[in-house]
Amino acid sequence: MKTLTILITILISISLFGSQMERLQKTEDKLLELINKKFESGSKEDNIRKNDIRKELDSLIHYDSFSKNTLLGKDPKTKKSYWDSITTEQQKEFKTLFKELIQEAWIKELKDFNNEKNRTLKKGEKGNITYKNEKTKGNLSMVYTVITTEDEITNVDFRFTGDYITDFILDDLSVTKRYRKSFSKHIQQKGFDSLLEKMRTKLKELKEEK
């Protein structure tokens, strides 16, 4: 969850403008407006707010590419990627679960970070974000940032393909590759159906936790 907290911190704290920065700035304004509204948990208004947050995240993240890239590890049995080794039905369920897991975790972290951000504004001790630069080559863009908190300094970079985020780089380590390694290990040991079950269980836990 710490990884997601850092990603959310960057996402809703953009203060510069650029080809992608400008879009993130608009998203920041909308997300902060949504999470600062006080609604009873589980109420109609709260559910509408959550759906609006999901729409904002959907406008930034290309879930299909993100999820597919996490299954590009090679299956030793088929000699193909895990993605190409599973059925169309399994691909569809994996993409749906992966998207919902990211959304549920981000909604939780948005609320947690908003509380932290409000405390930070009063203390003025942490939450400092430095935007180094943004580079674009063809259809690919990288936004390089550094986040400094009371406890640590972390490099967090966004990788865009077109107008959508398709990967995050934390201290030179790709989040996609991190997932790929974890998923590949689980599939090798317990099979793909076990991975889907684990994802279903985690999604249920996140929803019940709220």
Image: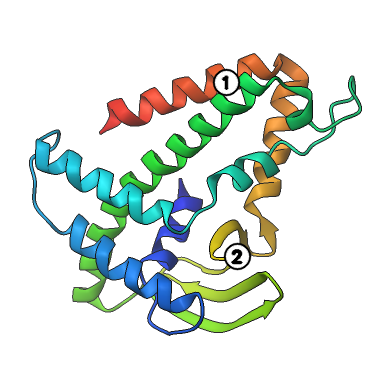
Instruction: Give the secondary structure at mark 2.
Output: strand
Q: Does residue 22 sit above or below 94 in this rendering?
A: below
Indicate the position of residue 51 as horizontal and vertical percent values: 27, 44
Residue depicted at x 19% and y 39%:
47
Residue depicted at x 42% and y 78%:
22
Residue depicted at x 78% and y 21%:
188
Instruction: Give the secondary structure at mark 1.
Output: helix
Which kind of residue does numbered mark 2 sit on? Phe
- Which disc, if any, is residue 160? 2
Distance of mark 1 from mark 2, alpha carbons?
A: 27 Å
**50 relative position to 142: left or right:** left
Q: Mark 1 — residue?
A: 196
Q: Earlier in the sequence, mark 1 or mark 2?
A: 2
Q: Does residue 204 sit above or below 162 in this rendering?
A: above
Front residue of this view, candidates 203 and 96:
96
Dividing the image into 4 quarters, which one contains the C terminus? Answer: top left
Which kind of residue does numbered mark 1 sit on? Leu
